[in-house]
Amino acid sequence: MLLVHGQKTWCVAKPSSDQATLLANINYACSQVDCRVMQKGCPSPATLINRASVAMNLYYQSRGRNHWNCDFRSPVLIVMSDPSKSHMYLS
């Protein structure tokens, strides 16, 4: 993972993102990277925003972790704390 001042980074969807855009982002990201992890129960809970964040982050991580690799149609965040271990994943 990319280190920014010693921190790892993740690309996630902002909670204000609309459903149609989240679905478009999932479809785009998963057309470019292997999203099979989402078929294995990841993320939990499997809300649309969590699934979009996983897909977008898979794309971001696989493409070099540059800010332009986290440039999707919906508002996004590059975060420095693991969203799966925080309150970023909303149920």
Image (tube, helix red, strand yellow):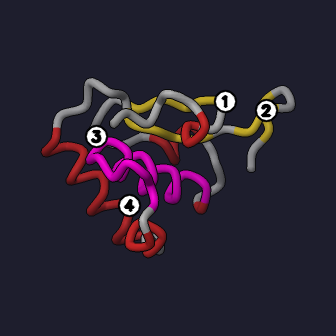
Distance CA(mark 2)–CA(mark 3): 26 Å
Distance CA(mark 2)–CA(mark 1): 6 Å
The vertical placement of 86 against 31, above or below, is above
Check contact, mark 2 vs mark 3: CB within 8 A. no
How crowded is the residue under tag 1: few (<14 C-alpha within 10 Å), some, or many (20+)?
some
Q: Going from the N terminus, do you reach mark 3 or mark 1 first?
A: 3
Horizontal and vertical percent position of residue 4: 77, 31
Q: Which residue is mark 3?
A: 73
Q: Going from the N terminus, do you reach mark 4 or mark 3 first?
A: 4
Distance CA(mark 4)–CA(mark 1): 21 Å
Q: Going from the N terminus, do you reach mark 2 or mark 4 first?
A: 2
Q: Nearer the viewer, mark 4 or mark 1?
A: 1
Horizontal and vertical percent position of residue 45: 37, 48
Check contact, mark 2 vs mark 4: CB within 8 A. no
Q: Which residues are magenta?
A: 42-61
Q: Which residue is mark 1?
A: 80
User: Quick one: 41 or 14, which is closer to the camera?
Assistant: 41
How crowded is the residue under tag 3: few (<14 C-alpha within 10 Å), some, or many (20+)?
few
Horizontal and vertical percent position of residue 87: 49, 27
The dominant secondary structure in magenta is helix
Quarter of image, res 89 = top left
Q: Going from the N terminus, do you reach mark 2 or mark 3 first?
A: 2
- Secondary structure at numbered mark 3: loop
- Secondary structure at numbered mark 1: loop
Q: Nearer the viewer, mark 2 or mark 3?
A: 2
Callout 2, which amino acid? Gln
Check contact, mark 2 vs mark 1: CB within 8 A. yes
The C terminus sits in image quarter: top left
Q: Which residue is mark 4?
A: 29
Q: Which residue is mark 2?
A: 7
How crowded is the residue under tag 4: few (<14 C-alpha within 10 Å), some, or many (20+)?
many
Callout 1, which amino acid? Met
